[in-house]
Structure formats: C-alpha cells, structure tokens
Amino acid sequence: MASEETRVVAGRYRLRSVLGSGSMGTVWSAYDEFLHRPVAVKEILLPPGVTAGQADELRERTLREARAIAVLSHPNVITLHDVARQDGEPFVVMELLPSHSLAELIRDHGPLSVEQAAAVGDAVAAALGAAHNAGITHRDVKPGNVLVAEDGRIKLTDFGIARNVSDASMTRTGMTLGSPAYIAPEVASGRAVTPAADLWGLGATLFCAVEGHPPYDADGDPLETIGRVVKGDVPRPSPGPLAPLISALMAKEPRDRMPLAQVRRELYPILEKAPRVLFGPEMFAAASGQREAATDTREISASRLAEGLAEGELAADPGPLPFAGPSGTGELAPDPGPLPFGAAPSGGTLTADPAPARPVAASGPGGRSVRATVVLVAVSIVVFLTAAFGGFVAARVIGAQPVVPPSKEQTVEPSAPQPTVFERRTGEASNVKGAPGGAFTVDVPVDWTRFTSSQAGDDLPPSTLVQFVSADGSQMLAVNHFPKYFPANSVTDYVSALGRSRSNAGFTLVYEAKLAEQDGVTMMYRTIDRSTTGSVSRTTYANVIRQGTSLWVVGVTVPTDQEETAKVALYDRIVPTFQVTG
C-alpha cells in the first residue's frame, strides 16, 4: 500500500503534505499531475466512533462547501477546481493560495494596523456580498477563515457550513453552529440564520484584527462563551477610525447591522490613503526563517517528494515540439515549410545557392570547357530539384497530407458549437414553514445546478429563492417566490424596492413593460459587482408575475458582454416555460 506521502487521488492529485487537520477533515498540499499545478485538497476525516449518519453529514458538509463556492466566481473567494472521488469518498480540490490565515498573523505579530484591518474588512465584505447575492450565507466568518497572501491577495475560505439547498439535512447536530467566539447572538440562541449573521462575523473578525484577541473568550468553555454572546453586553473596541464601523456591525439585532455596501464605503477613504504594500514579507516568515512557499499554514509533515519535485521541474517544460529533427523519432510536421531554394528574378533560373554568383572562368575546374561546366551545373540543378521535390512529396505522404496544399475552398471550417440541451426541472419555493403554493417547473440546461435559500431584508418581504447556476458560475436562472405579497403590495412596489436594494451595486433599469398575457411586467436591468481588484457588469432579464396572492420573479442573469446572445439563447427559451404547479 502506498504511503501517505505518495497517495494519488482520482488518478491525478498527488497528496504531498498536510496543511491543516481538524475534527472535520484534513487539508493537503497536492499536485495536479494532469494540469501541472499545485492545488489544495480537502479530505473528510471521520473521527473514531462516529455513526453512519454522522459520517454522512460530514460528507455532506464537504460537498456543501463545494456547491457553495462553485456558484461564486470572485477574486476574494477561494476558487473551486474539482470534486474528485476516491474509494467512494469525496475530495474537494481548490485553489492553493500561498498565505497565512489572519488568525496566524494576529497570533504571531499582534493587532493589525488600521490600514491592514481596513483591507481585510473590504475584501471580506466583497466576498460576502458576492455570496449573499448568490443566496449563500457563510455562517462561520472568523480570522481563521480569512487568508492573506504576501502579494496582497485576501480571500475568504471554508464555506463548509454555508447555508444552501442542503440546509435542512444539516440542522440536527451542532456542526452548523460555527465558532462560539464569532457566532452571531441570534444564531447562538437558536433563531433563524440570515445573511446578517455574516455581518456580525465580519465585525467580530475586525474586532480581533484591531484588538489582537476575539470579542469573547474563545479559550474558555464553549457553552459559557455562547451564554455571554447571547446575554452579555457587546464588547466595544478601543477608540479608533474603525471602532464605529465595528460597533455598527456587531449590533445585537440583525436589522440594526451596517449593510455590506455601507461597510465598503466607510472603508474606502482609509484604503485610498493606505500604502501600496500593507503586509510586508516579514509577516510571512516562519519562526525558523524557513517556510514552504506553496502552503497556507505550517506543514505537519513537510517532507518534499523527490518524484513530486521532478514533476514540478517537468511542468516547466513546454512539451514536445510538433516535429522531430533529423535524429528525432517524432512524426513529421503536417507542412514541412518552404522548399530549400529561392526564385531568381522574373523569368530567371532557380538556384540552389542564393549567394552572389562568382565570376566564371573561361574553362571550368579541371580544364572543363565553359559549355561543359554549364551543362554540368544544369544537370545538377535538375537532380537537386527532383530530390527536393521528392523529399517534399515524401514528407507530405508520410505526414498523411495531400501533396498539393488545400485551396481556400477546401479548408475545413471549425464545427459549430453544440446547441444547449434543456430539460424540464422541478423546484420548491415554499417558505420555511412549508406553506403550499411554491412548487414550479421550468426548462433549464441539463448541466446547471440547483440551490435553494431563504431571503429577507433589502426593503423586500421574506421570500424563497431557487437558483439554477451554470457549471462555470457565470450564468444563472433565479426563481424568487414572495408568498402573501398581495394585496398589501403591488408589482410597482417590488420594482421600486429592487432599485433601492441594488442602488449600491450600480443598479440601472434599462426597460420595463407590461406583460401581454400575464399580470405583471418584464424588465431588464444591469448591476455591477465591485471588488478590490475590479468590477464585473451583469445583466438581468426578468418577469415579475402576480399569481394569486403570491409574487413570482423569474429572471436570467449573465455577464453584460453576453446580454444580446443570452436573451435569445436563455431568457426567451427558459422563462416562457415557467409554470407554477402548486
């Protein structure tokens, strides 16, 4: 049996060293032997004595993380590469970011500066904004889940208990609780989990960043810590530029917490004046002065594989050339290139030597006459041309290519892309209490994945959101159900509330018109997802429909540069197939 250091998962991911290990699993530094790149691989770790049901829940948590981050494509969120299976167990393959966790930096270097903490706050707020827009609540925002790289990148990781479609199956145990020192009071007291819980986690993380310790005692009894979170006063940070923001995030009532867009606006003036390099190399040096560059925590077993090193060196090789030299063994190139001679001036004779002609003596070498020399040269040229052309023909034949180069008419055009295959899918958008009236069907591309979540806030009443997301996360169908919306509200109220809730995201309503055959409107609007590294413009086509006392919003969201093709290929194809079934 192979040793731990030489294990290969799914035939391509070679596990190299342990980056971290806990009660829920082990994270490995690994190498993708197919794409020649370092990756992080999360493996389920089953503690001794767990029941079959508990083991299934641990597996579900691993897959939950994969499903959550698969939806997100954001520079401040760790990227998902693959979900592989080995011996029936799932392994989550993710981006390997050479970094330290924020918890490590605070432990080793003490509190952050105001500018450093502001950069962390802005990055985490951007990541959470993308997650919340995708219907995902992280639920475990804390310094240990924030990664800081030496090049300045800051990413949120560990969506293992994020709230999505699998939520109902994950509420029977304490696994969904999160970290007691950073848990929101409403979650600790057993109330509903909403995105506002992540606002508290962000505030508690920033508290630790500027104070150097958690807002509550993380090293004491967990139950006692939770009791203080629920019943005790909220700790106040020391006076400083970030103190008001932290207090606004750590409000006891979820509705009183500062929205993420406002958080980023408050941090912008600090970041605008911050130095370009906030986290110097001294913060990333291990105590011994040596640290592996491809790990994100201190390695537990840090032996480097000789074969892994060799593979890393081979990865730098661009691969075999498309042809072999005279002594090579590879196949001949399909086109051997121009023949090894040039053309003389128009009407002239072909020559095998493009160098300037030398004067010809009256008699050739060895006493040959000029005529004999000319005849000999002519014969040589004919022989050379015959050999050259013969070699050209041989090369074309050996390369399985026609002797005559193909004409433009013969050129094979690239095949047209395969049309998208759709299938009828069902969804359940009832509210959390299971009220009837939320079932529906709709045509969706076969490879899109479904997610379900509950929504609240943003000037809109509670709703259930069902999303179908493309494999690359760039395209999405969203079905949002607002039960008992009418008669207290109107369709116009929804459109107005939507504009207010998205005002910080550059909301632009392009058009709105009444639907011809349904009670409602069709609309198109654009929004902008902003992050510390740039922004992405997105376009949404949506139908806002009244169905009895319920409001249904069915929309397709795509990158704005795809909006013209997506309207025909997705919106016009999908939305008309939507039907409420009960």
Image (cartoon, rainbow, N blue to C red):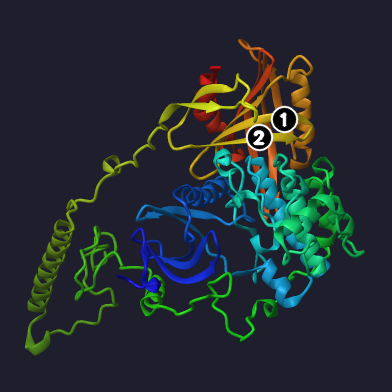
Identity of the residue furthest to the front in this view: 49
Give the residue drawn at x 19%, y 51%.
404
Res 493 seen here: yes
Q: Position of residue 300 (x, y in %)?
A: 52, 75
* Helix, strand or loop status at disc 1: strand
How packed is label 1: few (under 14 Cα within 10 Å), some, or many (20 or more)? some
Instruction: Kindly indicate the quadrant of the structure image that contains residue 338.
Output: bottom left
Pick the residue in front: 490 or 582: 582
Label of residue 462 in the image: 1
Instruction: Kindly indicate the quadrant of the structure image that contains residue 538.
Output: top right
Give the residue drawn at x 61%, y 86%.
288
* Helix, strand or loop status at disc 2: strand
Circle 1: residue type = Pro
Q: Position of residue 258 (x, y in %)?
A: 83, 47
Res 122 seen here: no
Side of 419 relative to 492 (left or right)? left
Give the residue drawn at x 53%, y 70%.
19
Q: Position of residue 238 (x, y in %)?
A: 90, 65
Identity of the residue furthest to the top in this view: 517
Side of 57 relative to 173 (left or right)? left
Residue underneath mark 2? 454
Side of 423 relative to 331 (left or right)? right
In the image, residue 184 sits, relative to residue 292, either above or below, namely above
Identity of the residue furthest to the right in this view: 239
Q: Position of residue 91 (x, y in %)?
A: 44, 56
Separation (CA) of disc 1 from disc 2: 7 Å
Side of 70 relative to 337 (left or right)? right
Instruction: Kindly indicate the quadrant of the structure image that contains residue 194.
Output: top right
How packed is label 2: few (under 14 Cα within 10 Å), some, or many (20 or more)? many
